[in-house]
């Protein structure tokens, strides 16, 4: 899978990847293998601030693996990532969330007793003295921001949320 959101410049392939202020997120040469199976082989991805991007491909193309690398669930074997021009290599989903990147999985039965708002903020709920602050929870979920640490860690103060294609009914294969 190769995803590039800008035209390539002939001869630029040999240059060492560098952070670039034009991109909110930049991934270069990302490789991930599971034993002998190569799931990602040199993937490049650039995403500008405010850009909406869809990853489309057949089953087994590496879409989920790429998002798991981005969200800290898997570590890339090779490659580099930058978020807001800073090196980005989360060692866990919690670390990624603290840096402002979250993956909201399509498996809707993980916490079926919670609302969508509560699921978005799961694990980072605004609370004081053990009591949930519902007003702040609604505000954060509406803004897509689930952590004040994430807000200070990202320039725009808005959480970078990743929704798999079939998260929304009718938006992907069932």
Image (cartoon, grey):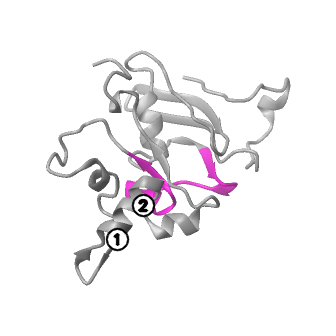
Which of the numbered marks, if any, corresponds to residue 126?
A: 1
Question: How many labels sit on residues?
Answer: 2
Q: Which residues are magenta?
A: 80-103
Within the image, what quadrant is residue 37 found in?
A: top left
Could you tell me residue 22's position as x and y percent?
76, 45
| 119 sits left or right of 5 in the view | left
Q: Is residue 143 above or below residue 108?
A: below
Q: Nearer the viewer, residue 57 or 127?
A: 127
- Is mark 1 in CB contact (under 8 Å) with mark 2? yes
Question: Does 16 appear above or below 136?
Answer: above
Splitting the image into 4 quarters, where does residue 10 fall?
top right
Local secondary structure at mark 2: helix
Seen in the picture, residue 151 relative to 78 is either above or below; the reply is: below
Which residue is found at the position 47% from the left and 55% from the top?
Answer: 143
* Farthest-out residue, front: 135
Choose between 4 and 146: the one closer to the eye.
146
Point out the residue furthest to the bottom here.
Answer: 129
24 sits to left or right of 110 = right
Q: Quadrant of residue 166?
A: top left
Q: Dot 2, how many residues are within 10 Å of its Cα: few (below 14), some (14-19), or many (20+)?
A: many
Q: Any magenta on residue 60?
A: no
Q: Earlier in the sequence, mark 1 or mark 2?
A: 1
Which residue in the structure is indicated by mark 2? 140
């Amino acid at each position: 899978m190769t995803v590039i959101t800008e035209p390539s410049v002939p001869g630029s392939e040999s240059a060492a990847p560098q952070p670039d202020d034009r991109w909110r997120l930049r991934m270069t040469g990302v490789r991930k293998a599971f034993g002998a199976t190569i799931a990602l082989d040199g993937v490049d991805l650039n995403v500008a601030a405010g850009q909406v991007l869809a990853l489309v491909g057949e089953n087994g193309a590496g879409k989920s693996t790429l998002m798991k690398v981005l969200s800290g669930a898997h570590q890339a074997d090779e490659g580099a990532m930058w978020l807001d021009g800073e090196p980005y290599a989360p060692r866990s989903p919690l670390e990624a969330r603290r840096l402002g990147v979250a993956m909201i999985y399509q498996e809707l039965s993980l916490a079926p007793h919670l609302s969508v708002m509560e699921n978005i903020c799961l694990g980072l709920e605004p609370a004081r003295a053990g009591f949930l602050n519902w007003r702040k929870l609604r505000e954060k979920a509406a803004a897509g921001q689930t952590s004040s640490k994430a807000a200070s860690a990202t320039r725009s103060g808005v959480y970078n949320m990743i929704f798999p294609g079939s998260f929304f009914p009718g938006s992907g294969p069932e």
